[in-house]
Image (cartoon, rainbow, N blue to C red):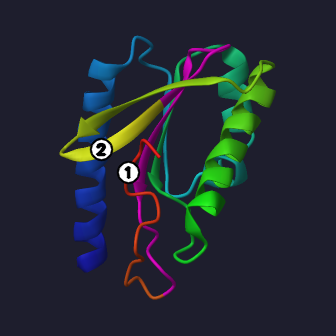
């Protein structure tokens, strides 16, 4: 029962986030990936991710956690974000230069990034703390998306 309730809540949040995203971006439609960590799309969405990038259709990736692994800190989390960005740029055949701004979805500050050479590729970083191995959560290392 708890798993079903959690899934329904997650699905509702995903729909709300997707609706909010449509108000922020000039490129909508295409594919929305919702992932936990900044490299889960690269690990678990292949080859669909590459196909979508190559198609030129809009791609919005919502990244929920900071990817800090609890105690690894902000430099580790930022390196995961930068690696994710570099991978998208490589797939698109452009340099890894991203524009960014912060906004709020449901009261949560988020960082929105757009690949400069391929503006149909967008990422939304919620930077929530990782869940920890036992699900107890971790102290967030990237609580301010502007850092």
Where residue 32 appears, as percent x and y from the top left, is 47, 34
Q: Do the residues labelled 1 and 2 touch (CB within 8 Å)?
A: yes
Where residue 47 appears, as percent x and y from the top left, is 75, 39
In the image, residue 119 sits, relative to residue 88, either above or below, namely above
Residue 62: which quarter of the image?
top left
Residue found at x 38% / y 18%: 25
Q: Which mark is residue 144?
A: 1
Q: Residues within 10 Å of mark 2 (few under 14, many from 20)?
A: some
In the image, residue 122 sits, relative to residue 8, either above or below, namely above
- State the extent of the magenta-drawn residues as a range: 113-133
Where residue 73 appears, as percent x and y from the top left, is 57, 68
- 108 falls in the magenta region: no
Residue 27: which quarter of the image?
top left
In the image, residue 69 sits, relative to residue 80, either above or below, namely below
In the rendered structure, the answer to whether residue 135 lies left or right of residue 1 reads right
Q: Distance between the residues labelled 1 and 2?
A: 8 Å
User: Considering only order in the chain, which callout, 2 or 1, is on the residue closer to the N terminus?
Assistant: 2
Residue found at x 62% / y 16%: 116
The residue at the far bottom in this view is 134
Q: Name the residue under label 2.
A: 109
Mark 2 falls on what kind of element? strand
């Amino acid at each position: 029962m708890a798993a079903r309730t959690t899934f329904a809540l997650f699905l509702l949040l995903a729909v709300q986030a997707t609706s909010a995203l449509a108000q922020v971006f000039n490129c909508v439609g295409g594919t929305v990936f919702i992932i936990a960590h900044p490299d889960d799309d690269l690990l678990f969405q292949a080859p669909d991710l590459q196909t979508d990038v190559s198609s030129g259709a809009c791609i919005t990736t919502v990244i929920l956690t900071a990817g800090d692994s609890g105690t690894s800190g902000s430099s580790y989390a930022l390196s995961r974000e930068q690696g994710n960005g570099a991978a998208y740029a490589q797939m698109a055949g452009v340099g890894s230069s991203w524009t960014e701004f912060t906004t709020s979805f449901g009261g949560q500050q988020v960082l929105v990034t757009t690949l400069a050479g391929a503006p149909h590729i967008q990422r939304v970083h919620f930077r929530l703390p990782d869940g920890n191995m036992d699900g107890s959560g971790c102290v967030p290392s990237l609580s301010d998306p502007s850092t």
